Amino acid sequence: MNSGIKPFVFCLFLLLIIFSITDSIAQNRSADSRAYKTAIGLKFLNGGGLSLKTFFSDREAAEFIGFFYYEGTRITGLYEFHGSLNTEGNLKWYLGFGGHASLYRNNNARGFGIDGVVGLDFKFPRKPFNIALDWQPSAEFGGGGYNGFKDNWGGLALRYTL
């Protein structure tokens, strides 16, 4: 098995366990829920990762992402501001900022950086799922040959809402 696939399979297995444990919690919520407090799932781009998003209020949230990809691992924390795009409140735009730490497989280089994010977030009515699509430009420092502006982060998130 390709070593880049192993972390993705582990994340998928972990996510399935979390889904099965939290299923009873979801059944106790209102069936017509269009908003969510917390969501956990997978995020895809040039690799795969775990995404955890939690709201502090209707307009403010934090997202934590652990990416595992062919060049290494990247842990990101983002603070996001949200606004509604429809009257039902289940389609939102968001933008924010944050930071990340990277560990590269090639020569064990380590880096850190600052991130921005802009995206769309949709909560399925009467279902405990949400989907998000975003772009996350960043600047990397201290990462050996990986320093500089990076415009290829972000991706598609598929999450289970709690």
Image (cartoon, rainbow, N blue to C red):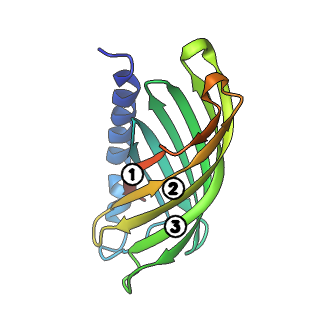
Badge 3 marks a residue whose secondary structure is strand
Residue beneath disc 1: 157
Q: Distance between the residues labelled 2 and 1?
A: 10 Å
Instruction: Report the front residue among 21 and 55.
Output: 55
Q: Earlier in the sequence, mark 2 or mark 3?
A: 2
Q: Where is residue 5 in the image (x, y as percent from the top left)?
A: 34, 24
Instruction: Report the front residue among 149 and 109.
Output: 149
Q: Earlier in the sequence, mark 3 or mark 1?
A: 3
Question: Contact, CB < 8 Å: mark 2 with mark 1?
Answer: yes
Q: Position of residue 112 (x, y in %)?
A: 68, 35
On-image quarter of the N terminus = top left
Name the amino acid type tagged 3: Tyr
Badge 2 marks a residue whose secondary structure is strand
Q: Distance between the residues labelled 3 and 1?
A: 14 Å
Q: In this view, does 101 lie to the left or right of 156?
A: right
Give the quadrant of residue 111: top right
Q: Which of marks 2 and 1 is nearer the N terminus?
A: 2
Residue density around tag 1, few if under 14, some if 14–19, many if 20 or more, within 10 Å: many
Name the amino acid type tagged 2: Lys
Name the amino acid type tagged 1: Ala
Residue density around tag 3, few if under 14, some if 14–19, many if 20 or more, within 10 Å: many
Image point (34%, 33%), residue name:
13
Q: In this view, does 46 lie to the left or right of 83?
A: left
Q: Distance between the residues labelled 2 and 3?
A: 12 Å
Residue beneath disc 3: 94
- The disc placed on residue 53 is 2
On-image quarter of the C terminus = bottom left
